[in-house]
Image (cartoon, rainbow, N blue to C red):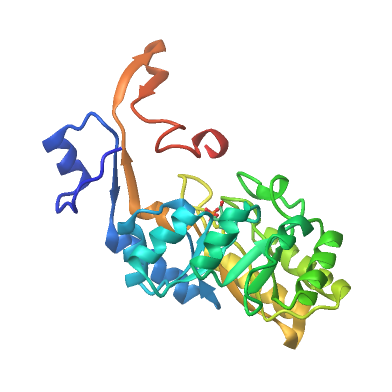
């Protein structure tokens, strides 16, 4: 993929003029900023951005311009990308498996919030300043996502309660987080997580000030139109039902849903076989279409 200076033309005009042989990703700043503003208007809590969805400076700086100043980073490279466009940004390091060098990089970059899903990962945070937040990530067997991260990350509920107690004993600010899986269009997935979080906290005897309800918000893939407001409303109702007046404040960290509508990937058809049923593109799952195989 090639990167060019900002274009004034539409993608169609650019393609007609340059006929590029390489795939080109077009980004519309106005659409990106509108999406960020919509998330902030609709969600009753802090909206952050999961940088892994797109870490280009054009994307990050437009999000900052639209008021996003907290970022979920998954690596030291993403921390550097955020700091380059927003030195004051608040960093949440929510990849729950880290090397010792990555923990040191996070401390040096001034990460404020960390997620963990195992005692071995909590032990690695021994040098992290105690005024930091540590969120326990838990996983449930929920349905509704195109790709379920629960098989990869997240403690079982009983383990999560023990982790919360350990986080509090170490002197960190305890929190909880979850991710229902990406492209989840079923509000009930979030509802189940919110109720389970309340049960886990009661079992642990730990109070939290805020909870991270993840990314996972669906994008328009040509079917099953996403309805983020329905998810937010369901979360709010479940929070009131399970926590009553002790409800933590919320944060969310959309990745794909923040950027998808603002981007168009132009690919070239290199060849066709089987009477047009098989199409060979100049891009694919090892390039700009990594989600295609898992998510359609
Ligand atoms: C911890 C965390 N937060 C947020 C996201 C963003 O998810 P999505 O792109 O489905 O919104 C991911 C995706 O991998 C993630 O791992």
Quick check: can you spot residue 108? yes
Q: In this view, does 195 lie above or below 22?
A: below
Q: Which of 94 and 239 is in front in this view?
A: 94
Please indicate whether residue 139 sits to the left or right of residue 128 in the image. right
Q: Quadrant of residue 128?
A: bottom right
Please indicate whether residue 19 sits to the left or right of residue 84 in the image. left
Q: Residue 278: x percent and y percent?
A: 42, 18
Please indicate whether residue 65 sits to the left or right of residue 13 in the image. right
Residue visible at 45% across and 32% down in the picture: 286
Residue visible at 17% across and 32% down in the picture: 19
Residue furthest bottom in the image: 245
Q: Nearer the viewer, residue 277 or 175?
A: 175
Residue visible at 85% across and 66% down in the picture: 162
Q: In this view, does 45 lie above or below 19?
A: below
Q: Residue 12: x percent and y percent?
A: 20, 42
Residue furthest top in the image: 274
Q: Which of 21 and 120 is in front in this view?
A: 120
Residue visible at 41% across and 52% down in the picture: 54
Residue furthest left in the image: 17
Quick check: can you spot residue 253? no
Q: Nearer the viewer, residue 173 or 232?
A: 173
Q: In which quarter of the image is ligand 1?
A: bottom right
Q: Is residue 102 above or below residue 146?
A: below
Q: Residue 39: x percent and y percent?
A: 46, 69
Q: Is residue 24 above or below residue 121?
A: above
Q: In which quarter of the image is the N terminus?
A: top left
Q: Residue 27: x percent and y percent?
A: 29, 52
């Amino acid at each position: 993929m090639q990167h060019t200076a900002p274009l004034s033309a539409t993608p169609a005009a650019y393609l007609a003029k340059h006929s590029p042989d390489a795939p080109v990703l077009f980004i519309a700043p106005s659409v990106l900023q509108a999406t960020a503003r919509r998330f902030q208007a609709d969600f009753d809590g802090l909206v952050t951005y999961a940088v892994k969805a797109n870490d280009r400076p054009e994307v990050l700086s437009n999000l900052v311009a639209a008021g996003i100043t907290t970022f979920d980073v998954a690596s030291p490279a993403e921390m550097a990308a955020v700091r380059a466009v927003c030195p004051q940004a608040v960093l949440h390091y929510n990849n729950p498996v880290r090397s010792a060098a990555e923990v040191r990089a996070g401390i040096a970059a001034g990460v404020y919030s960390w997620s963990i899903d195992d005692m071995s990962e909590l032990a690695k945070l021994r040098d992290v300043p105690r005024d930091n937040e540590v969120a326990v990530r838990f996983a449930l067997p929920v349905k509704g996502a195109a790709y379920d991260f629960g098989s990869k990350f997240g403690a079982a509920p009983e383990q999560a309660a023990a982790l919360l107690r350990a986080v509090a004993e170490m002197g960190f600010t305890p929190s909880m987080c979850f991710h229902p899986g990406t492209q989840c269009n079923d509000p009930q997935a979030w509802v189940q997580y919110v109720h389970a979080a309340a049960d886990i906290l009661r079992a642990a005897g730990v109070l939290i000030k805020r909870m991270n309800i993840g990314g996972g918000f669906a994008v328009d893939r040509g079917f099953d139109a996403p309805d983020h407001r329905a998810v937010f409303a369901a979360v709010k109702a479940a929070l009131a039902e399970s926590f009553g007046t002790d409800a933590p404040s919320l944060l969310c960290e959309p990745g794909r849903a923040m950027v998808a509508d603002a981007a168009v990937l132009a690919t070239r058809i290199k060849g066709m076989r089987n009477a047009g049923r098989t199409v060979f593109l100049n891009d694919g799952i090892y390039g700009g279409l990594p989600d295609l195989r898992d998510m359609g």
